[in-house]
């Protein structure tokens, strides 16, 4: 898809900074700025390089660009500052911002037209910025670009003036090195510092200022009536490619991702391309992983297992899926898989009850598409250890009660996806027996029952236990008078809160409710939790409902799962709707109608991506991560289901 933001869309700084863009390099590194070419978050930059998915460094934070035409000098870049420095207001000369296989800006200044394009090299910490300058004046014009550097861990901009050394295209500081090459004139400069202001971080209660440093510049003079090109290539290692080569390679790869997706729908094709940004190498595991979201998150086990079916399987990347699954199979410990991979010598964190069960689900979904018997046999010992550990008990009070249901969590543990603890407070306490965990548990037991023959095992015991789980689940979770499921069994007031977690009890491959009960669950969710942007995490009728997400860390965490809208459960809702309406053409047409706002969602926030969250009361601008893997993945599953139904109906 091609997204065009012309002058009518970006006529002011706030409007031009509403939209951002993202390019990733499959290592965990990325590039991102606003459409105004400013940084409005400290996590943004032109080269955020990655040693591993969770070790990232903001090397090139932004570019300060000046165009001189005759006696007139203007900024093309835009930026606000945290001191008395006047803002750079290049947005005033910006005639369009276009996203199509990458970002492109067009500027008009006194008869000079400047185009800027950016790209990242695949599987390299290398970024390119290429300018085309068309000078229709009767005098020369000069473009001068001063990179603003940080040389600090992502998300932690330097708060002191770090000395940087520039020499012959090599910059060193804080044990980090940046290489730069250009066809323009590179010149060292006396190191100066600027105090940047981050408008988006201020809105969300994060660090609103940071430092950046300039120690060199690149310059190109274009004679009258001629067209010139200025290239800048930034890299964490010396690069042998030109800026144009990097641009062309990036554009070809982005275009290929569209064609390889297998989708017909243009929105689904765009989502399939967007999904690629989250797939990254996990070096010490020797395989692939999925990053949860940009710009904040690394690879989390839960998010990976939720995003994998859509981002990887639905896009036909089966070898990538197998690599990701092997990464997590290798790190199973005591029946759990990592929720977070720290780096270096630290051990992974295993504080999740759902990731291991969802791993089993992903193996099943992979098997359904590939019938890869060798991989099932490879994974079988880990799958059985997971189930055994849940039966006998493991860390974080995870274990099976006599009724066959799984309990989890104690103290300040937060082991489900509603995992917030702030100042010793659990805003969404779900210790006990969470509804979706027990839906995953039943599903896992049935999967082992079904896969046992392929793995050379006996699945009879898993089937018997699954029957017991089903009986206990329906008896204890189903509320006939209310027509929906308890959210948790804990003996507290939280048990009967109407939350979105029950939707997964309808959409897993193996489920426990009757068709009539499933329809009532879907209707209850639709009535109180559904929005076209996502599902609310709590009914607005609940006294604990928070309509707004923002402010300090504490304020945000108190609202995070207390009504805030999340796009990712919307995928399960639509799949549940299709299921409970017979997967008919009429049901598919209804879902397509409800998906009508998807193009607008892809245009807002990070262009081509789906965000983490929206406010629960008035879902206007997106919030949280501007690009979230499981949001993209779960909606891809919906588009896949729609195309399968429509293809079947067409054949019929």
Image (cartoon, grey):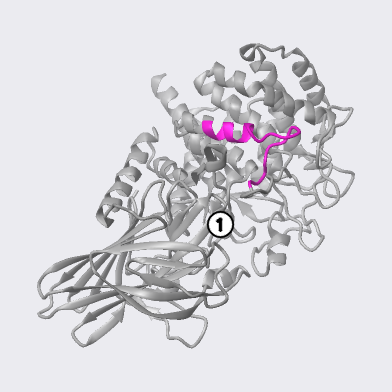
Residue 474 seen by the camera: no
Q: Quadrant of residue 296?
A: bottom right
Magenta highlight: main SS: loop
Residue 608 drawn above or below residue 651: below
Viewer-side residue, 9 vs 200: 200
Q: Residues within 10 Å of mark 1 (few under 14, many from 20)?
A: some
Res. 427 image quadrant: bottom right
Q: Is residue 85 above or below residue 212?
A: below
| Residue 135 x %, y % | 15, 72
- Using the rendered view, name the quadrant where residue 131 is placed: bottom left
Q: Image check: 227 left or right of 360?
A: left
Residue 34 can be seen, yes or no: yes
Residue 336 falls within the magenta-colored stretch = yes
Q: Please give the name of the residue rendered at 45% of the width and 43% of the height, measured from the top-left corner.
A: 276
What residue appears at the point 28 percent right and 75 percent down from the top-left corner? 144
Q: Position of residue 393 (x, y in %)?
A: 83, 33
Question: Circle 1 is placed at which residue position?
Answer: 625
Observer-nearest of 643 and 271? 271
Q: Position of residue 50 (x, y in %)?
A: 49, 53
Q: Is residue 93 magenta?
A: no
| Depicted 526 relative to depicted 35: above or below | above
Magenta segment boundaries in residue numbering: 323-341
For the image, the number of numbered tags is: 1
Q: Relative to residue 525, is residue 133 depicted above or below?
A: below
Give the side of residue 394 with respect to residue 275, left or right.
right
* Quadrant including the C terminus: top left
């Amino acid at each position: 898809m091609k997204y065009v933001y012309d002058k009518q869309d970006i006529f002011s700084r706030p409007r031009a900074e509403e939209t951002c863009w993202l390019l990733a390099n499959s290592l965990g590194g990325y590039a991102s700025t606003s459409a105004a070419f400013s940084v409005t978050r400290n996590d943004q930059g032109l080269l955020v390089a990655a040693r591993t998915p969770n070790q990232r460094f903001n090397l090139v934070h932004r570019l300060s660009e000046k165009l001189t035409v005759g006696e007139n000098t203007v900024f093309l870049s835009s930026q606000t500052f945290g001191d008395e420095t006047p803002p750079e207001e290049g947005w005033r000369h910006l005639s369009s911002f276009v996203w199509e296989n990458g970002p492109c800006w067009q500027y008009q200044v006194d008869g000079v037209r400047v185009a800027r394009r950016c790209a990242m090299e695949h599987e390299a910490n290398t970024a390119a910025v290429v300018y085309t300058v068309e000078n229709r004046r009767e005098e020369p014009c000069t473009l001068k670009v001063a990179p603003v550097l940080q040389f600090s861990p992502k998300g932690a901009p330097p708060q002191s003036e770090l000395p940087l050394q520039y020499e012959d295209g090599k910059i060193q500081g804080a044990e980090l090195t940046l290489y730069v090459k250009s066809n323009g004139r590179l010149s060292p400069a006396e190191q100066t510092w600027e105090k940047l202001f981050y408008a988006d971080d201020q809105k969300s209660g994060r660090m609103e200022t940071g430092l950046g440093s300039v120690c060199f510049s690149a310059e190109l003079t274009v004679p009258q009536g001629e067209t010139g090109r200025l290239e800048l290539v930034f890299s964490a290692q010396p690069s042998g490619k030109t800026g144009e080569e990097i641009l062309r390679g990036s554009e070809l790869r982005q275009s290929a991702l569209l064609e390889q997706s297998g989708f017909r729908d243009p929105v689904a094709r765009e989502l399939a391309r967007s999904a690629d940004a989250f797939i990254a190498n996990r070096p010490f595991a020797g395989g692939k992983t999925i990053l949860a979201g940009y710009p904040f998150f690394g690879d989390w086990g839960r998010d990976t297992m939720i995003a994998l079916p859509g981002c990887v399987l639905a896009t036909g990347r089966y070898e990538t899926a197998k690599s990701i699954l092997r990464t997590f199979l290798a790190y199973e410990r005591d029946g759990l898989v990592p929720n977070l991979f720290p780096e270096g010598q630290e051990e992974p964190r295993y504080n999740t009850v759902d990731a291991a069960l969802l791993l089993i689900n992903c193996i099943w979904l992979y098997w359904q598409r590939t019938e890869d018997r060798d991989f099932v046999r490879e994974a079988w010992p880990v799958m059985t250890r997971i189930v055994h550990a849940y039966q006998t008990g493991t860390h974080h009070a995870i274990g099976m009660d006599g009724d066959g249901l799984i309990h989890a969590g104690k103290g300040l543990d937060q082991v489900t996806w509603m995992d917030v603890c702030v100042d010793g407070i659990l805003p969404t306490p779900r210790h006990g027996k969470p509804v979706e965990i027990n839906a995953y548990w039943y599903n896992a037991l049935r999967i082992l029952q079904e896969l046992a023959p392929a793995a050379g095992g006996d699945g009879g015991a898993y089937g018997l236990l699954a029957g017991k789980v089903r009986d206990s689940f329906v008896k204890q979770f189903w509320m006939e008078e209310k027509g929906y499921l308890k959210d948790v069994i804990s003996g507290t007031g939280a048990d009967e809160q109407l939350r979105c977690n029950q939707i997964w009890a309808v959409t897993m491959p193996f489920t426990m409710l009757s068709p009539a009960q499933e329809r009532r669950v879907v209707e209850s969710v639709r009535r109180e939790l559904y929005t076209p942007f996502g599902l609310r995490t709590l009914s607005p009728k609940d006294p604990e409902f928070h309509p707004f997400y923002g402010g300090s860390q504490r304020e945000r965490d108190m609202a995070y799962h207390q009504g805030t809208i999340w796009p990712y459960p919307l995928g399960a809702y639509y799949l549940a709707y299709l299921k409970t309406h017979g997967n008919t053409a009429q049901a598919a047409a209804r879902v397509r109608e409800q998906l009508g706002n998807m193009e607008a969602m892809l245009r807002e926030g990070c262009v081509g991506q789906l965000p983490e969250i929206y406010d629960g009361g008035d879902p206007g601008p997106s919030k949280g991560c501007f690009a979230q893997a499981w949001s993209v993945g779960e909606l891809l599953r919906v588009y896949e289901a729609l195309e399968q139904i429509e293809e079947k109906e067409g054949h019929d």
